[in-house]
Every structure is written in structure tokens, then in C-alpha cells.
């Protein structure tokens, strides 16, 4: 079994419900067990800023699936939850990114692990620290906390505490 970390994000529709639906779908994948989910964080959009705020979380799983099979399941789940890829960094019902697959470093045309931008994104690093505070990056050997301190100043990310009537 390989320990994997998956980032989840949504800024369209019932954001919280979509993240929970994605987590439920990931938890029941074949040959997969031992899950842990971070709290939700609300995040200002980064690259394309004229859109609603995101909800983000990170899910930890153990799986016997190959990296390629896991990635295919993630894409299928995105489609089932209404993800349509119209515009890079645009609105999305759900976004599932494979952040880490054990200590493996994978560089293929359509799949790169660790996720190439996770080290600069507080909306990934904060929830990742919640569930794996001692985790290290397989490429650099640095603690995840170091990336947060070095690269994420000024990013607007807050713990999500839903109010009555929120999604």
C-alpha cells in the first residue's frame, strides 16, 4: 500500500457538498483504505482572480492502485461531479490533484507527481500540514512547513467555518 495525498477544491455550486462527494468516491476506490481528511479552507482564487472563492482540503489515503489507475479514477470522479474543462484556472465544480504518491517522483507527458505547483500554494500546504505535520517533500527532502514559510506569504487562506445557510 502506498500513502497518497490528494488536494480537493471547488468554487462552483455546493462547494462543501461536492468536496464531501469526492471524498466519499475516493474512499471507496478498490484496494484503498485508511483515509484522513483535513479541515476545509476558504481560499481566494490565485491565477484567475475574477471568480468566487474556493473551498479546499487535502485527503490522505493508502492505496494499492497504481499511480496511473488512481489518476484515472480521479478524472472519472471529477467528470461524474460535473467538472468541465473550459478554461485554465477557471470555475470548477471539483478539482482533484494528486499531490504525492508515496515518495515517487513521476514525470510523464500527462502526469507529474509531486504536483508541480503544490510547494507554492498555501491552500494545499495548510491542509496538508493539518493531517501530516512531519511530511517531507520527496524531491527536496524539506519539511512541508518550510515551503509554507518560504513561499506563501500574502496568500489569502482561512479555516472555513460555515454559517447557517452557507454551502
Image (cartoon, rainbow, N blue to C red):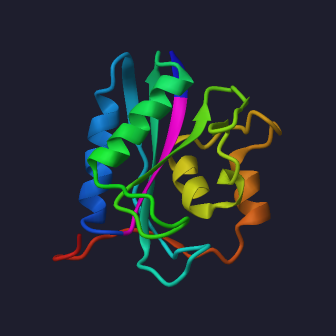
Residue 1 location, x and y as percent?
Answer: 50, 15
Q: Position of residue 18 (x, y in %)?
A: 28, 55
Q: Is residue 102 above or below residue 125?
A: above
Q: Note whether 99 is above or below 119 in the view shown.
A: above
Q: Quadrant of the C terminus?
A: bottom left
Magenta segment's dominant SS is: strand
Q: Where are the magenta residues, as a range?
A: 4-11
Q: Position of residue 108 (x, y in %)?
A: 70, 33
Judge by depth and name the residue closer to the eye, 77 or 159: 77
Instruction: Please give left or right for residue 22 compared with residue 69 in the image.
Output: left
| Residue closest to the far right | 140
Count of residue discs: 0
Looking at the image, residue 162 sits to the left or right of residue 69; the answer is left
Residue extending farthest to the bottom is 50
Furthest residue in direction left, as rendered: 165
Farthest residue toward the front?
86
User: On the image, which quarter does residue 103 sit in?
Assistant: top right
Residue 7 is covered by the magenta coloring:
yes
Q: Residue at x 42, y 38 (%)?
A: 74
| Residue depicted at x 34% and y 35% | 26
Q: List x then y, in percent, for residue 118.
A: 65, 52
Image point 27% across, 39% down: which residue?
Answer: 24
57 lies above or below 102: below
- Give the residue displayed 63% in from the left and 39% down from the top: 110
Q: Is residue 162 magenta?
A: no
Amino acid at each position: 500500500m502506498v500513502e497518497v495525498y490528494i488536494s480537493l477544491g471547488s468554487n462552483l455550486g455546493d462547494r462543501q457538498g461536492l468536496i464531501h462527494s469526492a471524498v466519499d468516491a475516493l474512499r471507496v476506490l478498490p484496494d484503498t483504505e485508511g483515509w484522513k481528511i483535513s479541515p476545509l479552507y476558504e481560499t481566494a482564487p490565485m491565477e484567475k482572480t475574477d471568480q468566487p472563492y474556493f473551498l479546499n482540503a487535502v485527503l490522505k489515503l493508502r492505496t494499492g492502485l497504481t499511480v496511473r489507475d488512481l489518476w484515472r479514477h480521479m478524472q472519472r470522479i471529477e467528470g461524474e461531479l460535473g467538472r468541465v474543462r473550459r478554461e485554465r484556472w477557471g470555475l470548477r465544480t471539483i478539482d482533484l490533484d494528486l499531490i504525492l504518491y508515496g515518495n515517487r517522483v513521476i514525470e510523464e507527458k500527462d502526469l507529474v507527481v509531486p504536483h508541480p505547483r503544490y510547494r507554492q500554494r498555501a491552500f494545499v500546504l495548510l491542509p496538508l500540514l493539518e493531517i501530516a505535520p512531519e511530511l517531507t517533500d520527496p524531491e527536496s527532502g524539506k519539511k512541508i512547513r518550510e515551503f509554507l514559510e518560504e513561499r506563501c506569504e500574502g496568500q489569502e487562506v482561512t479555516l472555513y467555518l460555515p454559517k447557517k445557510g452557507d454551502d
